[in-house]
Amino acid sequence: MYINCKGKLIDLSQPKIMGILNTTPDSFFSGSRSQNIDSALKRIEKLLTEGADFIDIGGMSTRPGSAEVSESEELERVVPVVEKAVLEFPEIIISVDTYRSKVARETVEVGAAIINDISAGSMDEELLKSVADLKVPYILMHMQGSPQNMQTNPSYGDVTLEVNEFLSMKINELKSLGIHDIILDPGFGFGKTLEHNYELFRQINTLGFGDFPLLVGISRKSMITQLFEISAEEALNGTSVLNTMALEKGAKILRVHDVKEAKQALEIWSRVSNKL
């Protein structure tokens, strides 16, 4: 499983770590937030030093009930950080968390190499065409509803079957546009109850029929906080447990707030699995 990030082939046969940077004031975990370029660069340096293979930068919170920000504000939050990060860390591979085509285009122009879209192209009809033109890998995520209403009353007959059907349909659409470097994200916490999340997690190895790399993003999410009635700040241990289980189920990318702990989980899993 390889993805082509601006001419650099990334081998995902050995799982990778994606560190999270939010250039927002309201993302659900305060430890991921940076609201100026200097603090953003310090966090990026920390994530890279701890072993991150990718840095995922977002300029708009998509937590349940979050407010949408304007396109211009998202651009102002993200573009300068991407541009500066590429200059400071020339080997960095940046993913940009956006569903807007203009943000995708402008961030890739200054150095981003992956687009991470929570909406699967549903919130900007030009987004998928832009990704095809930009020739960058695309993270395809499942979400029921929108960030504003997705947790109001999520409903499925069979959550795993429906998520897989959705991903399969979108994969065909992406391929028809010429997008072939596709990473699948089940969208834990996006339009899913606690029960849906765990049912889906149990069967994530079936998603994409094993043909596409799987990204798992459960870091400090409600799968843990709701289960134990704790805050996101208290959810690191549960995150490490789920990350390790995700690796066992075939995850190729762990998207996390805490890179050091995820890297340790990956190394222990690799040694136990005789992959090191």
Image: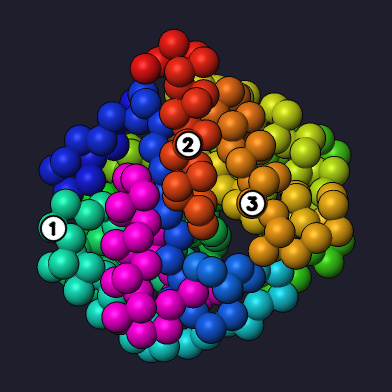
Instruction: Give the residue type that dot 3 points to.
Output: Leu
- Residue at which label 3 appears: 236
Q: Which residues are magenta?
A: 33-61
> Relative to 80, does residue 115 appear above or below in the rendering?
above
Q: CA distance from mark 2 to mark 1?
A: 25 Å
Element assignment for label 1: loop
First along the sequence among labels 3 and 2: 3
Q: Viewer-proximal residue, 232 or 92?
A: 232
Locate the C terminus by quadrant.
top left
Instruction: Give the residue type that dot 1 points to.
Output: Pro
* Residue drawn at x 59%, y 80% as measured from the top left: 26
- Residue at which label 1 appears: 90
In the displayed structure, does residue 157 sit left or right of residue 1?
Answer: right
Q: Is residue 220 magenta?
A: no
* Residue drawn at x 58%, y 73% as measured from the top left: 30
Q: CA distance from mark 3 to mark 1?
A: 30 Å
Q: Is residue 59 magenta?
A: yes
Q: Residue 260: image x %, image y %?
A: 45, 47
- Residue at which label 2 appears: 264
Kindly give the residue lying farthest to the top in the view shown: 274
